[in-house]
Image (cartoon, rainbow, N blue to C red):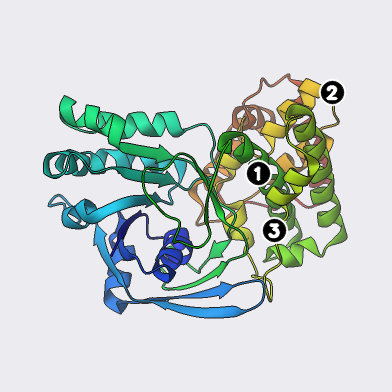
Amino acid sequence: MKRVLIIGAGRLGKGFVGETFDNAGWNITFLDKDPRVIDELNRHNKYTVQVFRTDDIIMHEVTNFRAFATDDNYSVMNDFLESSVIMCPLYPEDFEESARYLGKCFEQQFKVDPDKKMTLICLTNKNHIIKDIEAWYRNAIPSAQARDWFDSHVAIRDSIVRRSTDAETHYATQIDSTAVASLLIQTPLYNDISDVEWLEPRDHLEMLKDIKVFTINGPHATTAYYRHLKGYNTIPDASADPEVAALANAVHDVTIKAVMTEYPQITREALTDLEYLPKAKNELPDSIHRVAYDPVRKLAFKDRLMGVVQLCLKYNLDYSPLTKAIACGLAYYAEDDRASVNLQQQMQKKGLLTTTAQIIGLPKDHPVTLNVAQQYLALDAENLIPAIPC
């Protein structure tokens, strides 16, 4: 039986990746740096995923797994050597640390079976980082011979995540997940995954990922951040507010114009196929906290909102809906979201204009920076900016 190694046993790792490979009959191994995540899995010896499909809601109890915390003894080594596919549902900032840990594992794989080929699939919304990830993994391998083997025997591939997965905490063993669209995976692959539902190899993935992050994640983040100012708890609740919906739709409309101009090779039909996902039965009540998490990354220069702003500047399109969404994001605060806490502390210490410039990656006197600041002050005039206990 084939084995998959899942690096990161949080919500996405358990609720999507683990559940999907379990359905296909693969052996599953989880590896996580957080001992509490692994302790919870091993204490229960199972976890449950409530899967929202288009026509049904399924309770899936997953029991066929092994779970290890990263340790100096490399307890996961034997399972690593049995694995052909490695799935990495990680935040962008965690890949370099994972590479440092797995370097010895790739070295050992080269020693025991140099003919083996492996595929490592990255599940992160950040685009254009595969070359960096390849370098981190390669440089972490101790010997030159094993690094040369890595170059020809390990395929590191990107993916486009189109599945919402949520739980109360990252270590929870009760998880909600939608299953209405496939994970799109960069080609070519070195290993066969055709027996696993919801995994779809796709060409031109880097272009498609830019488009997906702009057209899906941008309006989604807009809904989350505007909701935060208006007091909602879930995305469906926020979307039902006419003002929230109007801003999200305006962000979507200008995004479509910008994307279609930047990528004339993609048809409107293909774009619709990428961005419009089927409705799940009894829509999963996606939390604002999950969608809004880490505003510093999501408001950054090349990400879901500012990336489209750059296209608007390039093609002389109105970017004001995007700058209002960014202003909403600058006001986001959750006490258990360290990035949002740091953002608000920076706002109080350095002021609105300096903080805005640093977050979005433009000078303080740039028209976009000034417009974001104006939008923020307009929200404050409406008494929508909350007092932050920082």
Other-residue count near label 2 (Cα within 10 Å), few / some / many at <14 / 14–19 / ≥20:
few
Q: CA distance from mark 3 to mark 1?
A: 11 Å
* Contact between labelled residues 2 and 3, with CB atoms less than 8 Å apart: no
Report helix, strand or loop for mark 2. Answer: loop
Dot placed on the residue nearer the N-terminal end, 3 or 1: 1
Q: Nearer the viewer, residue 75 or 205?
A: 205
Q: Given the image, on which type of amino acid does mark 2 rest?
A: Asn
Q: Quadrant of residue 63?
A: bottom left
Q: Given the image, on which type of amino acid does mark 3 rest?
A: Leu
Image check: 212 left or right of 3? Answer: right
Q: CA distance from mark 3 to mark 2?
A: 30 Å
Q: Which residue is mark 2?
A: 316
Q: Is residue 299 visible?
A: no
Dot placed on the residue nearer the N-terminal end, 1 or 2: 1
Q: Which residue is mark 1?
A: 212
Q: Nearer the viewer, residue 193 or 285?
A: 193
Other-residue count near label 3 (Cα within 10 Å), few / some / many at <14 / 14–19 / ≥20:
some
Q: Quadrant of residue 316?
A: top right
Q: Which residue is mark 3?
A: 277
